[in-house]
Image (spheres, rainbow, N blue to C red):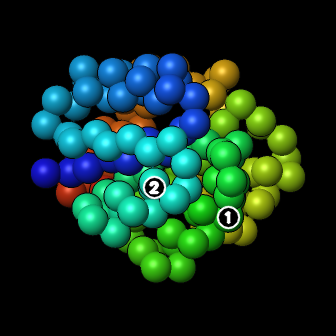
Amino acid sequence: MPEILIVEDSAFFRQLLKETLTSQFPSVRIEEAADGDEALRKIEISKPDLIFIDIKLPGENGLELTKKIRAQYVDIVIIILTSYDLPEYREAASQYGADLFLSKGATTKDYIHTLVNSFLSKGKYRPD
């Protein structure tokens, strides 16, 4: 069964994204983490196929977390999902190994559905 991890310090946004994913992908297991330490513990236990990571997290930021995850798990799809759509963040996300950088404000339920569906339908959970 495919698994998605949402790493987001806002409980409201985390729950909203989880509900969106659960309603559109009922067979996908959705896990949550409020910070990088919790995320790393969950990744070690279950190695998700896809991770949504916010840039602004308590303690270690999402870019540093992405770099750590990428160093150990090259096959996990990492999507930076943030309110801070700045060119320097986009560049850093790419340099640190994120597969995609998405602005929360510009991302719709339909886009999330299409994006996740494209990963899951390939069977390998990776974009082309």
Q: Position of residue 127 (x, y in %)?
A: 42, 56
Q: Position of residue 31 (x, y in %)?
A: 32, 43
Point 66% across, 37% down: residue:
82
In the depicted structure, whether residue 75 falls above or below residue 10: below
Q: Secondary structure at mark 1?
A: helix
Q: Is residue 91 left or right of residue 93?
A: right
Q: Amino acid at mark 1?
A: Glu
Q: Is residue 57 left or right of residue 113?
A: right
Query: Measured along the vertical axis of the image, is residue 24 above or below residue 79?
Result: above
Report crowding for label 1: few under 14, some 14 to 19, many 20 or more residues within 10 A (C-alpha).
some
Q: What type is the residue that disc 2 sits on? A: Ala
> Residue 66, percent across and down?
59, 63
Label 1, label 2: how many angstroms apart (C-alpha)? 12 Å
Q: Which residue is mark 2?
A: 39
* Residue 12: mark: none
Q: Is residue 99 visible?
A: no
Q: Could you tell me which quadrant the C terminus lies in?
A: bottom left
Is residue 47 toward the left or the right of residue 72 in the image?
left
Which x, y percent locates residue 85? 77, 37
Precedes in sequence: disc 1 or disc 2: 2
> Residue 58 versus residue 46: which sits nearer the camera?
58
Residue carrying label 1: 64
Residue 14 vertical placement versus 58 (above, below): above
Residue at image x 77%, y 36%?
Answer: 84
Compared to residue 71, the image places residue 105 above or below, namely above
